[in-house]
Amino acid sequence: MCTTCGCGSNEVLIRGRQAGRGRKTDAPVRFRPHAVETGGKGSDATRIIKLEQDILARNDYVADQNRRLFSVNNILALNLVSSPGSGKTTLLVRTLEALKGEFPLAVIEGDQQTDNDAERIRATGVDAIQINTGKGCHLDASMIERAMQQMTLPRGGTLFIENVGNLVCPAAFDLGEAAKVVVLSVTEGEDKPLKYPDMFRAARLMLLNKCDLLPHLIFDVVRAEEYARRVNPAIRIIRISASSGEGMTEWLAWLAAEKQACA
Amino acid sequence: MHEMSLAGSALQIIEDAARTQSFKRVRKVWLEIGELSCVEKEAMRFCFDTVVKDSIADGAQLEIVETAGRGRCTQCGNETQIATLYEVCPQCGGYGMQVIAGDAMRVKELEVE
């Protein structure tokens, strides 16, 4: 058990029920090492085995399987990441309300505990499945794979995956999404892109949220955006407010363009 | 602290190798951790020691092989050593270094018996 954030146990719950370990499909995760024994470097009783294997290879393999499933079913999958309290869920609720009826929608919610966010999503009429990571600090590809086996896929539509609020760990884990969307709120520090560069590097879009609060805050928007572009020159940035609706049109247009690109 | 799941994945790689290459015990593990990978070395040590308990790698010595970060400037093509993802190109002053080395997390080698 880690002492920093307490993650690392196997207490993953999907829809409040224990998630079985490993895959439920018949297809095995194939992960065959190209191992070559060099020999001669170990002591008498030991030998050296060369592996050269990427630690994330298994996750990436499952993520690719997810991506294939999304592609076959014409689903745009987006991975929403941010620190806790950036307003992801409220933004998502607003987005779902705007998109409802246009095409099928579904949400996978990731939190350490509680079903609260999934409940908020379901109140919009959109199906949401809650993954409780227990002590875990991020979603990984196999959690998404297992969640998808328990839900109706939004064929021809959009799947939003709201990751655990954490700007560190989710950066490394591909879930099979078309893009990571990072939400930064103006109530946070403007230097977050520099403090957590991996996440801003991994994201294709940054939503600068809670912009309606700017008149009350000391937050340098231009500087925040410049920091994000230092880390990731190609990142697209939209200033938005889930409360006032500012930037929603631009965000919905981005979603529509992504949807078209993945069709 | 994703190091815990990464350490778990490393152990899985080791256990898979034990099955295909028939070894019973792991004495030493070499992990390559790039300077630009999102891994904190000390956290990885702590997590590794924890996850390998009661496994074939219980008590194995962990050697972390660090690799330096290298980037190529997306504007002028200059290649240089970088320690962060937001370093400025020393040649043209531009941002946006494309990482060309030093972001790997790999199980390199094992000493087994």
Image (tube, coloured by chain):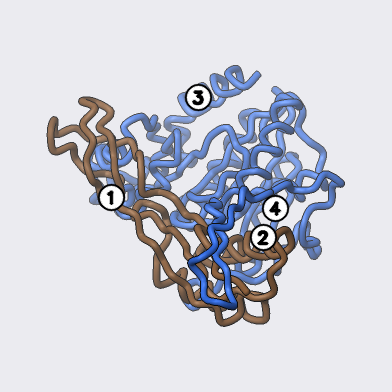
Chain colours: A blue, B brown
Residue located beneath label 2 in the image:
B17
Residue located beneath label 4 in the image:
A143
**What is the chain identity of the residue bearing mark 2?**
B
Q: CA distance from mark 1 to mark 2?
A: 33 Å
Of circles 1 and 4, the one toward us is: 1
Q: Position of residue A153 (x, y in %)?
A: 78, 35
Find numbered disc 4 in the image and state the secondary structure of the residue it sits on. helix
**What is the chain identity of the residue bearing mark 4?**
A
**What is the chain identity of the residue bearing mark 3?**
A
Looking at the figure, which quarter contains the C terminus of chain A?
top right
Residue located beneath label 3 in the image:
A254
* Residue kind at label 1, given as amino acid type: Thr
Q: CA distance from mark 2 to mark 4?
A: 24 Å
Have a look at marks 4 and 3 and say if they share a chain: yes
Image-based side of A123 in relation to B53, left or right: right
Which residue shows up at 30% across the image and 49% down it? B69
Residues at discs 2 and 4 in contact (Cβ within 8 Å)? no
Have a look at marks 3 and 1 and say if they share a chain: no
Q: Position of residue A48 (x, y in %)?
A: 55, 65
Which residue shows up at 19% across the image and 40% down it? B88
Q: CA distance from mark 4 to mark 3?
A: 27 Å
